[in-house]
Image (cartoon, grey):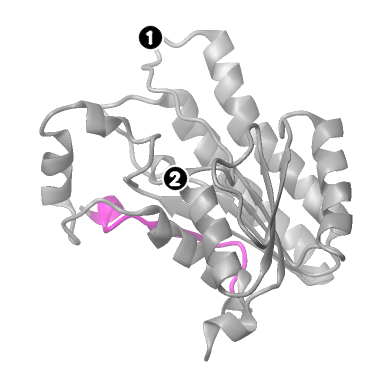
Amino acid sequence: MDLNATLPRRVIVTGASSGIGRAVGDAVIDSGGRVYGLDLRAPAVPRDGLVSRTADLTDPAATAAAFDDAESALTGPPDAVVHCAGVYRWRPISEMTVAEWDRVMRINGTGSFLVAQAAARVMTRGAIVLLSSVAYGRGDAAEPCVAYSASKGAIVSLTQQLAVELGPRGIRVNAVAPGMIDTPMLTLGDTPGAVAALTERLPVQRLGEPADVAAACLFLISEASSYITGATIPVDGGYLIS
């Protein structure tokens, strides 16, 4: 099966200005699709096929307005939504404040809910992909991130519930759980030897690239995955089993 031939042509990507979100947007455009990119900041490098908007996706009104605008910008309802926007906070429970907890849960958890809700309102059929993390399934003693782990676990449960609710409407919902991906969010890069120590444990012996996660997202929004919904797929180089 030619994956490109089964990919949707109108795709909303959040967190599109950098990291995994940018890689997803680039991959969709390279396949011939059109991307409506949402982020708190504008992309550093505009390109053909990308319509960019700034939006606070923790704000219900702003999120709904952005999705309404997407229908006009894409000349039709979106065929797929890939929600990559999120935040990481390295903080053990003994040091984390309620304000920090609330911020992480609001951006990662409430943001995912609002994006999915807005997507369900404007989509007629298609696929939604949310970004969880391997943190949902494995604790991390080296870099404790209690709020992050909890928020990414919530996304796994949200994905399953949305798949049940939206499936009869022809909308599939899946999640991708990245492992250690080489993006600005990866704090291991600040610790000498930490990356080498980690990759030695991984079956694939390397860090992931944003393009690795983008490839999984494209599979999940394509017709090649038409019988997959409610799943969380690790893209982690074997981290969860190592």
Q: How many marks?
A: 2
For label 1, the residue is 94
Identity, as a three-letter code, of the amino acid under mark 1: Ser
Q: Nearer the viewer, mark 2 or mark 1?
A: 2
In depth, the one of 191 and 158 nearer the eye is 191
Q: Position of residue 235 (x, y in %)?
A: 38, 58
In depth, the one of 188 and 143 nearer the eye is 188
Count residues near mark 2 (Cα–Cα under 10 Å), then give few for <14, some for 14-19, many for 20+.
many
Magenta residues span 228-241
Q: Does the magenta stretch include residue 107?
A: no
Badge 2 marks a residue whose secondary structure is loop
Q: Which mark is residue 131?
A: none
- The image quarter containing residue 160 is bottom right
Identity, as a three-letter code, of the amino acid under mark 2: Ser
Residue at (11, 50) in percent of width and height: 200
187 to the left or right of 61? left
Determine whether 115 is above or below 241 in the image.
above
Badge 1 marks a residue whose secondary structure is loop
Question: Alpha carbon of mark 2 to alpha carbon of mark 1: how far?
Answer: 22 Å
Q: Which of marks 2 and 1 is nearer the N terminus?
A: 1
Q: Position of residue 12 (x, y in %)?
A: 70, 55
Q: Which mark is residue 133?
A: 2
Residue at (30, 52) in percent of width and height: 240
Q: Where is residue 62 in the image (x, y as percent from the top left)?
A: 82, 33
